[in-house]
Image (cartoon, rainbow, N blue to C red):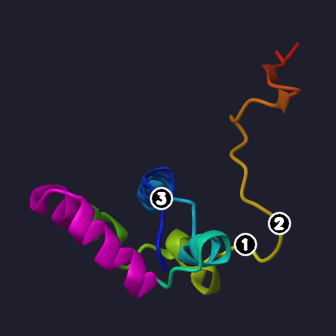
Amino acid sequence: MSLSIQQIDRVIEMAWEDRTTFDAIKFQFGLSEKEVITLMRTEMKPSSFKMWRKRVQGRKTKHAKLRTFVSGRFKCSRQKHITNNTISKRY
């Protein structure tokens, strides 16, 4: 599969995010976990790739089947509510 530079950047960004699963990347870009790892290895500096692999390896949040919550999306209680691209304040 051929990805544009913007798509590659987005895959890397999603792979770095702790709560974005490999399943979400596969759904959006059609890349398996193994393909994401290969992409990260070729697109990143060796030290950055090693740091990323160390963080991701065994992380439950990167694999949908290992997550503790079953349905919906995890949302931190401290996360601000976003409405129409403006952040609403808590009163």
For the residues carrying marks 1 and 3, which lies nearer the camera in this image? 3
Point 70% across, 36% down: residue: 79
| Residue located beneath label 1 in the image | 69
Q: Report the span colored magenta.
A: 33-51
Q: Quadrant of residue 27?
A: bottom right
Residue type at mark 2? Gly
Magenta segment, principal secondary structure? helix
Q: Quadrant location of residue 67?
A: bottom right
Residue 90 located left or right of residue 29: right
Secondary structure beneath disc 1? loop
Q: Is the residue 28 above or below the residue 18 in the image?
A: below
Q: CA distance from mark 3 to mark 2?
A: 30 Å
Q: Is residue 42 magenta?
A: yes
The answer to whether residue 41 is magenta is yes
Q: Which residue is mark 3?
A: 4
Please give the name of the residue rendered at 58% of the width and 83% of the height, measured from the top-left corner. Answer: 66
Q: Observer-nearest residue: 25 or 1? A: 1
Q: Which residue is mark 2?
A: 72
Question: Type of residue at label 1?
Answer: Phe
- Specify whether residue 54 is in view: no
The answer to whether marks 2 and 1 mark residues whose Cβ atoms lie closer than 8 Å is yes
Secondary structure under badge 2? Answer: loop
